[in-house]
Image: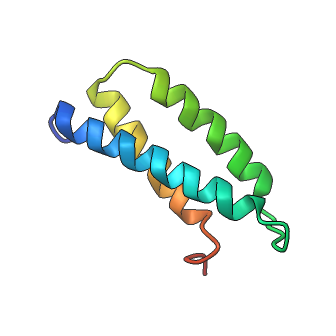
Amino acid sequence: MPAEFVAADLKRDLASLAELLGDMRLLYRQPRRHFADSQKLVDLDQEIRDALKRAPSAALQVEVQGLMARLRALDPHTAT
């Protein structure tokens, strides 16, 4: 069962997600780097932009947390 919806938590999560997406965009645009996961980032970027347009809800809060986890998994500095 998802945690109780808290608007302030969702607002914080959305801000973190947008910041993390910006950081990842910069990493993937560096000309000296080649990432096999570039297409995954493009696809995830679209999902994130769509989520940022949605009205706040408990379902969105859960989705944002999942998107953040997927985005972190693409970070070449933390990938194993």
User: How is colour applied across the structure in the image?
Assistant: rainbow
Q: Number of callouts in the render?
A: 0
Instruction: Report the side of 69 relative to 5 (left or right).
Output: right
Instruction: Report the side of 73 relative to 63 (left or right).
Output: right
In percent of width and height, residue 55 lies at: 36, 18
In percent of width and height, residue 22 lies at: 57, 50
In percent of width and height, residue 30 lies at: 77, 65
User: Above or below — where is 12 with respect to 6?
Assistant: below
User: Above or below — where is 72 with respect to 56?
Assistant: below
Which residue lies at the image location 76% right of the left edge and 58% below the top edge? 29
Find residue 60 and report its image quarter: top left
Instruction: Report the side of 35 relative to 52 (left or right).
Output: right
Which residue lies at the image location 56% right of the left edge and 58% below the top edge? 23
Which residue lies most toward the top here? 55
Instruction: Report the side of 74 relative to 55 (left or right).
Output: right
User: Above or below — where is 49 with respect to 31?
Assistant: above
Q: Quadrant of the N terminus?
A: top left
Find residue 57 and report its image quarter: top left
Which residue lies at the image location 66% right of the left edge and 53% below the top edge? 25
Instruction: In this rendered view, identify the residue nearer to me: 21 or 70.
Output: 21
Which residue lies most toward the bottom here? 80
Tell me if residue 18 can be seen.
yes
Tell me if residue 5 can be seen.
no
Q: Quadrant of the C terminus?
A: bottom right
Find residue 74 and report its image quarter: bottom right
In percent of width and height, residue 71 lies at: 55, 55
Which residue lies at the image location 44% right of the left edge and 47% below the top edge? 17
